[in-house]
Image (cartoon, coloured by chain):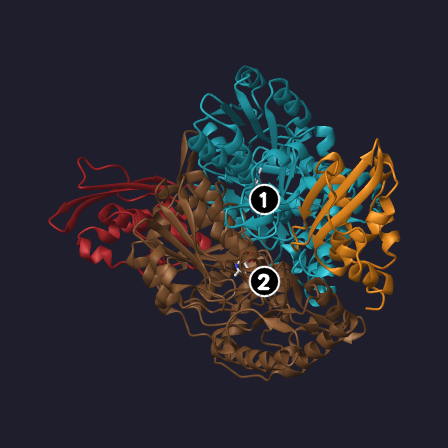
Chain colours: A brown, B cyan, C red, D orange
Amino acid sequence: MAISTLPEPPVKTMPSVAEIRADFPILDIEVHGHPLVYLDNTASSQKPIQVIEAMNRYYREQHANVHRGIHYLSETATSAYEDARRRIARFIHAGSTKEVIFTRNTTESLNLVAYSWGRANLGPGDEVLITEMEHHSNIVPWQIICEITGATLRYVPITDRGELDYEALDALLTERTKVFAFTAMSNVLGTINPVEELVAKAHAVGAIAVVDAAQSAPHMTTDVQALDADFLAFSSHKMLGPTGIGVLYGKRDLLEAMPPFMGGGDMIREVKMSGSRWNDLPYKFEAGTPAIAEAIGLAAAVDYLSNLGMDWVLQHERELTEYAWERLHEIEGLRILGPGPERRGGLLAFVLGDIHPHDVAAILDMEGVAVRAGHHCAQPIHDHFCIPATSRASFYIYNTREEVDKLVNALYKAKAVFAF
Amino acid sequence: MAISTLPEPPVKTMPSVAEIRADFPILDIEVHGHPLVYLDNTASSQKPIQVIEAMNRYYREQHANVHRGIHYLSETATSAYEDARRRIARFIHAGSTKEVIFTRNTTESLNLVAYSWGRANLGPGDEVLITEMEHHSNIVPWQIICEITGATLRYVPITDRGELDYEALDALLTERTKVFAFTAMSNVLGTINPVEELVAKAHAVGAIAVVDAAQSAPHMTTDVQALDADFLAFSSHKMLGPTGIGVLYGKRDLLEAMPPFMGGGDMIREVKMSGSRWNDLPYKFEAGTPAIAEAIGLAAAVDYLSNLGMDWVLQHERELTEYAWERLHEIEGLRILGPGPERRGGLLAFVLGDIHPHDVAAILDMEGVAVRAGHHCAQPIHDHFCIPATSRASFYIYNTREEVDKLVNALYKAKAVFAF
Amino acid sequence: MDDLYRANILDHYRHPRNKGHLENPDIHYHDVNPFCGDEITMELKLDGDRVVDVAFDGKGCAISQASASMLTEEILGKTLDEIRHMGKEDILEMLGIPIGPVRLKCALLPLKVLKAGAWGLEDWPE
Amino acid sequence: MDDLYRANILDHYRHPRNKGHLENPDIHYHDVNPFCGDEITMELKLDGDRVVDVAFDGKGCAISQASASMLTEEILGKTLDEIRHMGKEDILEMLGIPIGPVRLKCALLPLKVLKAGAWGLEDWPE
Ligand SMILES: Cc1ncc(COP(=O)(O)O)c(C=O)c1O
Ligand SMILES: Cc1ncc(COP(=O)(O)O)c(C=O)c1O
């Protein structure tokens, strides 16, 4: 169904952050005697009651398997599942619900493209171009598929400021390049890449553009048609939605031409012992019973975000990031990776002197402040900067300046413990 | 961790069916003015509050991404997720939690085996043996992988009584057979296959045995060690658990030797731009953020089933099936596919004269009775019997004899509407 | 139940119109509903752009078969261009019964097969 | 915090014992914690079955480095057979601090590397 004919999302209201926080039950817990300060949103966000309750209601009133049942509950579940797909399609401005495939997470979405499109279209002499700032989920599938098909994997280097090296990029993008896969926002450097421009560069040499939107979809407007992306992947759990579901957007003509990825129920039109015919999109790529409750939960999540407006979300996070950027720079020996706050998303990965990030995170945790420490599934970035790990604080719609202050105070404590 | 050292599951209590029903909120709804009679359990079961609440609690109090975080919530979520794996491992009597891999559903579990084990071990001249009574999810992955590898797919025929043709099986199982994949219980015929015996036959010719336990795991004891299965797959949503998660059990030495399926976060030990090293089991096969809440929900589901005892579950369903078998046979023109109630699970697929199963299901639905109609993702069975579709009533722990009576009454109504 | 299985639906199901095959049809197409296995074949004879003869064959439920039977009556004498503009609403109006989302696929199968035969496999009419 | 970063942990972290490399070690093994990238190398010199010299090298957090440092003191003079029987409990006792499930992997990394070096890659000691 054409998305343009759908009713508009509900009218935007602009609640205060205090009102938003009231929707998130987990923000009321205490950690080691302190109120939780949740700054690990890049890894996974928390969920509002609207999302939790949508799934609750589904299991209490609407559950059955979808698509094949003629009875009331199956029709109800089918409608709810397909309505969820429509709302998610609208959220990313997809032209059709046929272009929205449910997967488990960003990782599976990217593997689907690599296995299905890659196996059919790559061979020796072809090149796959990715970047040095990718998450492992946008590296390893390409390593695997290049090994299977004999194609060559190349990396766009990053500069010391944590941005793509555009000169190198232009040299690396050639008519041998069949795929250019890159992240819309780095989960370590925070760098927001110019997706539209990068897609155009890929298209200029005849390559398809695969966008890892795991970090951008939760935090800014995603318009797949304006971006002209061929494929775009994201995860529900990072954007207020449940675990267990992700999305792959793909252009319809590409998806039509691709062989299926997994085989099984629902993805076939006809199974004869001698062979099978595939079903229409998007079902061709959704083998087996799908994550029904999770699709409904994700739809509630994107409604929640739409209601705030993605512009508000980005703005709120930018303000926090600017504030945090200043406050963190007050701390001697603290070094933040990546570009300035005006060109990054709401996350800050840093090192604090030579205190190991695990120790930083452990001490912050004792103060109730949750940050992540490690290589954040992006070893090549850390290799580039010759550091094994970083600590990372990341913001979302419910975070406040007071929480940034608590982060800073806790960092001073860490320095005190390790002052030697 | 060795499963044998775990504490025993909680002491069994034996609630009445009325008490069980009280745990399932959805059983209270009305459908077209009638109380819901849910007889579509083979497609998907309903969920008790214990399962719904476990996930609810997780999102309200415990959520964060697993494995990589040092803060309180991440440690809590990691513990809950790994504890869920342990409880599920114990439910199927796995020797180690390393042998329990979380997937989306049975379908993905079977695809994982076909893609990963199949790509590494199959080639021209090799044979994959499946049966004519398989669900599409245990057919199509093998069709795909045989096409990729050049191996040959063969089918064990079924008899008109809906059982495996053992003479044909013995002729088809040869030293060329590398995989014998079969269902433990047919989702159309109800046939319970002698899994232990079939596994032994596979091993006798040096083949691995892949068991589709989608229909057996919810309804009877699963002891992977006693069965000696090499791989065994099942879905959460058919056994009181949430959608969006399934399990693949695999013998450790086989899993260790297999290449990974999907690439990405968590499944690697080290990612260098030049290549990657894989993580330990089971993580090697769990790429990206897993279905955390869903694992916790499934663990609550298997606890619920363990508490009843799988012997009680099987016995309860057998009694209902015997009763339904008798009552349905009272209806003239009704024909049930498959073996007698003593050798089948709690499901009955049937045709009613020449009334199309869709019409049967639609009329039953008007009476509040939910059954499934169609080919149930098992076209080869229907081709064998030269019928396009069947209606199927299937039972679970909360169904009653009174519900069977309502089914029978509704079937008489269908006959009346189409009496011509 | 009375709603879904109105007398005219049952009548078309029991006594399908234009059921069978044409000799040398100009357009012939066959497809199945992947969710349930219902099958429909549609055949047309054209005079220029106009349908001058039509037949269907198939196996399936009362809804898909009655929809096919009614559809053959509906399109006889119409031009391909008129048929191209037919959609879900026309089928629902033709059947005159309330139909849920899953059953809708049964009801729309004949039109889908017809359109696929005339213009190649297209979208499920939605 | 006082709990996790007790004086003796910080002391071993600041002043690691037996850090560096041996000349011609009999056993040498290096591995990383896949969840965080911490690295440990363990080297042993044996007299028959007995550890007569030991060194570790590595990068990582206070817990993994202190654990490695303490472990080298712990095993010096022990036989390989005695080391084989060491497990999670021994490490926890050695460290003497409460450790959550994720941090446990940091604490156990040195023992894991040691055992992998001695007997080939085995399970994470659990
Ligand atoms: C025997 C059998 N195998 C496999 C499946 C597929 O299960 P899922 O759709 O959960 O992947 C089913 C479910 O209908 C089944 O009955
Ligand atoms: C940029 C980026 N890509 C991909 C992923 C993988 O997401 P998931 O684990 O949900 O598959 C992440 C999540 O950490 C990410 O930040």
Q: Nearer the viewer, mark 1 or mark 2?
A: 1
- In which quarter of the view is residue B393 placed? top right
Q: Amino acid at mark 2?
A: His
- Residue D54 lies left or right of residue B213; in this view the side is right
Residue A143 rendering spot, x and y as whole percentages: 48, 46
Quadrant into which the N terminus of chain B falls: top right
Viewport quadrant of the C terminus of chain B: top left
Q: How far separated are the C-alphas under marks 1 and 2?
A: 27 Å
Chain where mark 2 sits: A
Report x, y in % for residue B387. 45, 33
Judged from the image, the quadrant occupied by ligand 1 is top right
Mark sitting on residue A237: 2
The residue that mark 1 highlights is: B277
Count neighbours of disc 1 (C-alpha within 10 A) and say few if under 14, some if 14 to 19, many if 20 or more. Answer: some
Tag 1 subunit:
B
- The residue at 41%/59% (across/down) is A97
* Residue A112 visible in this rendered orientation of the protein: yes
